[in-house]
Image: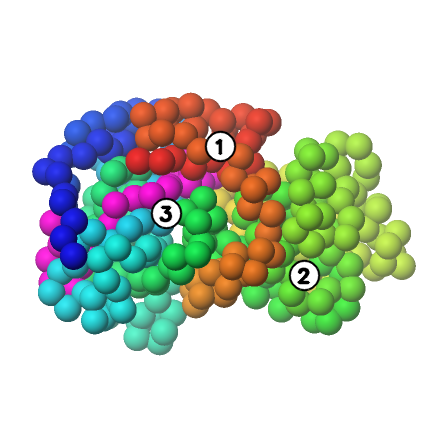
Amino acid sequence: MTIEIPRTMPAVVCHGPRDYRLEELAVPRPGPGEVLVRVKQAGICASDLKCYLGAALFWGDAHREGYCQAPVTPGHEFVGEVVSLGDGAGDKYGLQLGDMAISEQIVPCWKCRYCQRGQYWMCQDGDVYGFRRETFGAFAEYMLFPRDAINHKVPHDLPASQAVFIEPLACSIHAVQRGDIELGDVVVIAGAGPLGLGMFAAARMKSPGLLIAIDMDDQRLELAKMCGADLGFNPGKVDVVDEVRKLTGGYGCDVYIEATGHPSAVEQGLHMIRKLGTFVEFSVMREPVTVDWTIIGDTKELNVHGSHLGPYCYPIAIDMLRKGLLPMDRIVTHELPLADFQRGIDLVASGKQSVKVTLLP
């Protein structure tokens, strides 16, 4: 089987905050152990938006180096068709030309302390699709999976419009795992965006006693119920801390997962959660968040867990999507051509007309 590959391709290039341009780039050629795919769909993530808007995490400040290394092609949520395989790549990953495939967001170094301990998602020196110059992203017609990447074959019966959700769903699953949910727990997930919706589906599999969604958008609360939530509260209309306390005999929820990206949701969770509860912080915040740390320590003795990426969760995400555990026809609301990337970013920024926006290179 031979697949014809052009010399150049359209690609979005990030040159800096609010400076993203559609350009013509050379199509990469795979070396030993590398995989070239033709991108079928690429999702626009909230972190892509924060990078576009200039958040300090991505561009740096007095205290840290920026995560983004411009110029770079963005995009870390994707699925593609394998069109070329470097020497050994087919056997290594179980891939053939024509297969659908994805690659985990981080490309580990496999040498640092974390990689040596199997904690590859926290790699000290790894590359990340869509943010590092060495590992270009998916807002392009073609993209290369480097030799150290973690690649997964995607079943052919999973449409690209669903397979593009594998990466965010894997991140959602990991966040739920970090919550250490026990049978019968009262679990609150703040944020019913794409990642929060994946968390409801994953948390439902843990058999909580009560699964509560919190969001400022009533339509998203209804969508959260379709993903597994029992109840939905809008903090713009009710005192959500009071409502959760009423449902729990005044104690508060057992597990609180923050997936809004808004500082107010962090403080809200600290007041809502019971003593000895587990707080999971998932969001990429645009700015530093200040809270009363006495609540975490002396007042409630909370377990506070972070959550980063979706390690070891991609096979689970694929299985969940194949089983139809999420209403993907309601979650992927916009599929746009690559040339309309700016409209896609604007849709994600407004958050009023869309849930998940994807690009079709």
Where residue 204 is drawn, which disc sits there? 2
> Distance between the Cα atoms at labels 2 and 1?
26 Å
The residues colored magenta run 29-50
Q: Quadrant of the N terminus?
A: bottom left
- 254 sits to left or right of 351: right
Residue 262 image position (x, y, % from top left): 59, 38
Work out whether 265 lies above or below 281: above
Instruction: Look at label 1 and name its amino acid.
Output: His
- SS at badge 3: strand
Residue 269 image position (x, y, % from top left): 69, 49
Reply yes or no: does residue 353 show up in magenta: no
Residue 302 at least partly seen: no
Instruction: Look at label 2 and name its amino acid.
Output: Arg
- In the image, farthest residue toward the front: 1
Residue at point 24% right, 50% down? Answer: 37
Reply yes or no: does residue 46 show up in magenta: yes
Q: How many marks?
A: 3
> Mark 1 = which residue?
334
Q: Quadrant of the C terminus?
A: top left
Work out whether 154 lies above or below 351: below
- SS at badge 1: strand
> Mark 3 = which residue?
78
Single out the mark in the foreground, 2 or 1: 1
- 198 sits to left or right of 256: left
